[in-house]
Image (cartoon, grey):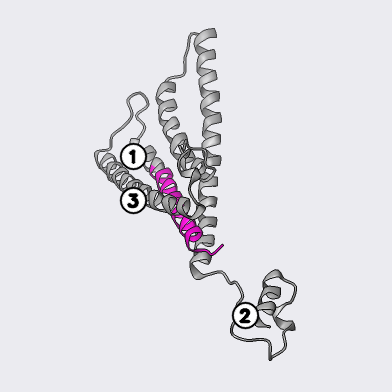
Amino acid sequence: MQTEIQKEVTLGEVSPNELSPKDNSPDITLKNDSAFQKITNVFEKIVVSFNNVLHKISSVLLFLMMVLTALDVAGRFFFNKPITGTYEITGLTLALIVFFSLGSAQLKKDHIEIDFLTSKLPVKVQAGMTAVSSFILFVLMSLTTWQLFEYTKRTWLSQELSGDLGLPLYVFMGLTLIGALAFTLTYLLETFKSLLQVVNKG
């Protein structure tokens, strides 16, 4: 009797409130999100929003870099007066575009992955391997972000400037640090989500 009622509750045919007190035994359990699942969901919203903002900024920077390059070429060709510092600004802006887009590309699975072997494994095994590899990458990116922070601090203390325009390099280094941090968080999120796939039943 209890087995039949439990199947009906699982299939949604009978709600828990419709069960009589005699039938409402401790064996009937409802699926609730675990605390880890809730934390992962909140963390995912934060990471996705963070990377989406950076990706939109990188799109704007790409457009501005394109406009600057076009004006520089036009000025050089028609007036023999190129825009000073275009090459320098393009290089610094390109670094920001790359770092600001890394996390968004990871969330959308746009990075190159070779999975012709792992794709044949069971789903939980794939999730376990993804959790391990993502955690390793999270540790490596954490170390990279830390070293980038140390390099930014040294650049700030030395007041190193760019060659043509004399721009403070620590500003651009600090901005790339934000992109590296966002990219690092995506690997932590992927670790959490893969662990949930491993422990979830069914």
1 vs 3, front mark: 3
User: Of marks 2 and 1, which one's residue comes earlier in the chain?
Assistant: 2
Quadrant in which the N terminus is drawn: bottom right
Please tell me how crowded label 1 is: few (under 14), some (14-19), or many (20+) other residues with Cα within 10 Å: many
Q: Which residue is mark 1?
A: 170
Q: Position of residue 199 (x, y in %)?
A: 48, 63
Q: Which residue is mark 2?
A: 28
Amino acid type of disc 2? Ile
Label of residue 124 in the image: none
Q: Identify which residue, 82 or 145, lies in the foreground.
A: 145
Picture residue at 71% right of the left edge, 74% below the top:
8
User: Of marks 1 and 3, which one's residue comes earlier in the chain?
Assistant: 3
Decide: is 18 above or below 149.
Answer: below
Q: Does 145 sit left or right of 120 as displayed?
A: left
Picture residue at 49% right of the left edge, 56% below the top:
193
Picture residue at 58% right of the left edge, 72% below the top:
32
Decide: is 198 above or below 137.
Answer: below
Amino acid type of disc 1? Tyr
User: Of marks 3 and 2, which one's residue comes earlier in the chain?
Assistant: 2
Is 110 one of the magenta-colored residues? no
Q: Which residue is mark 3?
A: 139
2 vs 1, front mark: 2
From which residue to which does the magenta span run?
177-202
Q: CA distance from mark 3 to mark 2?
A: 42 Å
Q: Identify which residue, 188 or 182, lies in the foreground.
A: 188
